[in-house]
Image (tube, helix red, strand yellow):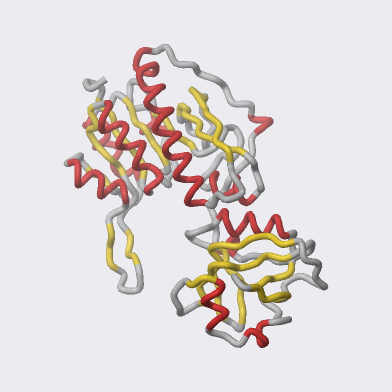
Amino acid sequence: MQDKRVIFMGTPEFALPIVNCLYESVNLIGIISQPNKEVGRKKIIVDTPTAAFAKEKGVHLMQPIKVREITEEIKELNPDMIVTCAYGQIVPEEILNIPKYGCINVHGSLLPKYRGGAPIQRAIMNGEEKTGITIMYMDKGMDTGDMIKKEEVEIEETDNLETLSNKLSLCGEKLLREVLPTIFAGTNERIKQNDDEATLAPIIKKTDELIDFNQTKEEVFNKIRGLSPVPAGYFMMDNKRVKVYESYKKDEKTKEPSIISNIYSDGFAISTTNGEIVITKLQVEGKKPSSGKDYLNGVKKESLLNKRIN
């Protein structure tokens, strides 16, 4: 397959095993990433993970604001195939039609479930027990193209967004290595999606990050781990944003939701509709992340009890 000219489109760390697979397997003639962004308080511009990979390996790098801007450049590169993974933009049909073998997407769900930009987050937040990777042909719809192959990955209760993303990324690399030769040989499967079974996974908005303790402890727990460590769910306490990175459920009966109901050795508990969520790793606005135990050592515990949040 080393004679096959392939362009990769992807941006975050999740995409690195995929682009590395292509670098080792085909003639990787270009990498398209989202533009680099400012990071931290000092607003230092940092390469995206795939942009850094391209520079390290000496692969031609393109970072347009809108991918449509480089349509002619892609045509001139004359790729046999384009592979995408977590790129972050809709690819226009005029680009989809360029490569001889089509455009292939490595998607982080078991399609047709969780079409969209946040399939991993939404699967955890919705309490799913399994998800997976689907390799599919791209069309003008959002994750609606024919499927080539998919593989299940278990979602464990200890998983958060980071750990599940890592598992899915490695699964995607393995699956891509399996299907690439069949695509070039024309022997791969092409399975239509059942649109009646489709669900959506829209990108996470700021409003999605607010934790609502007027829900069950299961729903709150799943939201916390589905958004951890980035962007992290949060609640408001004393007019300050408190991000939550780690927690666990407790069956303790409480009077009403959204109140700090108990203090434990490893953190403090907030009541929900059917129990408590114990906050064990957090970050108060303007301070560094800390364990629940360390946080409690720096405050008057009596002042926390019965405090209403949000």
Work out whether 274 lies above or below 118. below
In this orientation, which residue lies closer to the viewer: 302 or 7?
302
Q: How many marks?
A: 0
Work out whether 43 lies above or below 231. below
Q: Quadrant of the C terminus?
A: bottom right
In this orientation, which residue lies closer to the viewer: 35 or 93?
35
The quarter of the displayed image where residue 307 is located: bottom right
In this orientation, which residue lies closer to the viewer: 170 or 252?
252
Question: Is residue 305 left or right of 157 when viewed as pictured?
Answer: right
* Rendered residue at 55%/44% (across/down): 119
User: Furthest-front residue in view?
Assistant: 265
Work out whether 306 lies above or below 229. below
Q: Quadrant of the N terminus?
A: top left
Q: Where does the image place residue 167, in percent across and percent down from the top left? A: 47, 41
* Rendered residue at 30%/48% (across/down): 64
Q: Where does the image place residue 11, in percent across and percent down from the top left? A: 36, 47
Q: Where does the image place residue 303, in percent across and percent down from the top left? A: 66, 87
* Rendered residue at 27%/26% (across/down): 25
The quarter of the displayed image where residue 67 is located: top left
